[in-house]
Amino acid sequence: MKYRTDFIETKYKWLGEIPSNWELKKVKHILFEVTQKTEIGNEELLSLSQYTGVEKKKDKLKDKNDNLTNAQSLIGYKKVYQNQLVSNIMLAWNGSIAVSEYNGIISPAYCTYSFRENYNPKYFEHLFKTEIYKSEFKRKSTGIIESRLRLYSDKFYNIPCFVPDIEEQNKIVDFIELKKKQIKVLKNYNSLIFGKTNPKTGFLKEYLQTLIFNAVFGKIDLSDFGNEMDLEEENLALVAEEITKYGEIDNEQIN
């Protein structure tokens, strides 16, 4: 994996450096809020989780006796369309913000946003879920105590974002998805490496979060990236080696 060296400082201390050919744009130039509501209430009911993103509510039911919802009517719920961003304004600071893969409806307490042209929604989902952005969401949220914090659109709109061109956004998203697949394959077929994983430390989760951070913050050089052969055995071996080295560094820091 190659790393970039062409960085320039931003005026935002919390963001630090940015690749020299990327832009900084405020959220309001990337997306806009939409408030379309259902008049019939029979669309697919969706839910939002900080861990699993936007899901079909029916897929989360434990058994046939579970209720889809306790609401008497879903009329007035917000419509959600594929590739829109959904934010739980009370928990955006904790990662409850995600792009929907589905059309449906969701609680009117949430905010829904559409992206403008030449932006890959998944790139910004990954960006917004980094610890740096979650911390900024918390700083920009309004409220006296943590349980009352709310990230309203006017505050959200003024947060700056790293913005590579659309081609690199697409590469970053493809790179992250590929790495997730590689990790899944390794987890299934190489228990020797993953036997070192400690559930209490969340080693694999930490490794993937670090990789995603480096990708969306432009640390990784993806100029030669192509995913046609990256799931071949020799490439999986390189990923396994990379994960092992990461674990050794992590253990040294702990000890």
Image (cartoon, rainbow, N blue to C red):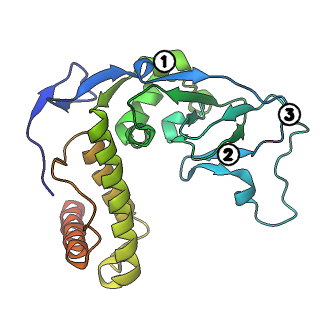
Q: Secondary structure at mark 3?
A: loop
For residue 40, which numbered disc appears in the image? 3
Q: CA distance from mark 3 to mark 2?
A: 18 Å
* Few, some or many residues within 10 Å of mark 3 (<14, 14–19, 20+): few
Q: CA distance from mark 1 to mark 2?
A: 24 Å
**Residue 251 pos. (x, y %):** 23, 67
Q: Secondary structure at mark 1?
A: helix
Amino acid marked by disc 2: Ser
The answer to whether residue 241 is left or right of residue 153 is left
Question: Does the image show residue 143?
Answer: no
Of 97 and 38, nearer the camera is: 38
Of 115 and 205, nearer the camera is: 115
At a point 57% along the width and 43% down the height, the residue shown is 100
Amino acid marked by disc 3: Ile
Mark 3 in CB contact with mark 1 (< 8 angstroms): no
The answer to whether residue 152 is left or right of residue 165 is right
Q: CA distance from mark 3 to mark 1?
A: 32 Å
For residue 216, which numbered disc appears in the image? none
Amino acid marked by disc 1: Lys
Residue occupied by mark 1: 155
| Label 1 vs label 2, nearer the camera | 2
**Residue 36 pos. (x, y %):** 70, 24
Q: Quadrant for residue 252, please give it.
A: bottom left
Residue occupied by mark 2: 47
At a point 29% along the width and 47% down the height, the residue shown is 171
* 19 w.r.t. 46: above or below: above
Q: Secondary structure at mark 2?
A: strand
* 4 w.r.t. 238: above or below: above
The answer to whether residue 34 is left or right of residue 98 is right
**Residue 241 pos. (x, y %):** 19, 72
